[in-house]
Amino acid sequence: MFKTSSLPFAAFLTLTKKLRFISIETNPTGNADICFDDPSDIGAALELAFINSEPSTFVAPNDYHQAIKNLRGSIQRTVNRSRAVLRG
């Protein structure tokens, strides 16, 4: 499994389907980790390529914006549920 807290990178992964989205989890700091299935252990290399803006990481801007928007909403719902459980 590959986890990232980077919303832009997670949006890239969900859009390109280079790794399969599994879930969003809250970590001990209360922030969200976006989890992907990574059987070939390529997540870190993909993230480095993304950070370096390699041509293979370019995606359509409108699609990318929508992927970020969708993930942001999912993250907010997950964090809110987690906080509600902690408050009991």
Image (spheres, rainbow, N blue to C red):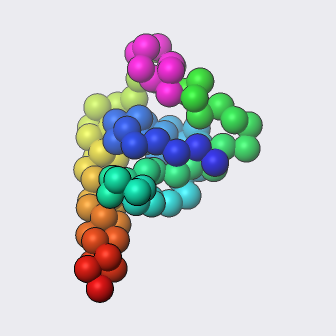
Percent position of residue 65, x then y: 26, 40
Percent position of residue 67, x then y: 34, 46
Residue at 59%, 34% in the rendered image:
43
**Quarter of the image where the C terminus is located:** bottom left
Side (left or right) of 39 relative to 76: right
- Taking depth in this image into account, of 2 and 18 the one nearest to the observer is 2
Residue 32 within the segment the image draws in magenta? no
Residue at 40%, 57% in the rendered image:
28
Percent position of residue 3, x then y: 52, 45
Q: Quadrant of residue 78?
A: bottom left
Magenta residues: mostly which secondary structure? helix
- Taking depth in this image into account, of 56 and 32 the one nearest to the observer is 32
Name the outermost residue toward the right: 40
**Image position of 11 with respect to 54: above or below:** below
Question: Is residue 37 visible in this depiction of the protein?
Answer: yes
**Image position of 86 with respect to 1: above or below:** below
Number of numbered discs: 0
Q: Quadrant of residue 22?
A: bottom right
Percent position of residue 58, x then y: 41, 23
Q: Quadrant of residue 85?
A: bottom left
Question: Is residue 70 visible in this depiction of the protein?
Answer: no
The magenta stretch is 47-54
Side (left or right) of 36 relative to 40: left
Residue at 43%, 51% in the rendered image:
33
Residue at 73%, 44% in the rendered image:
39
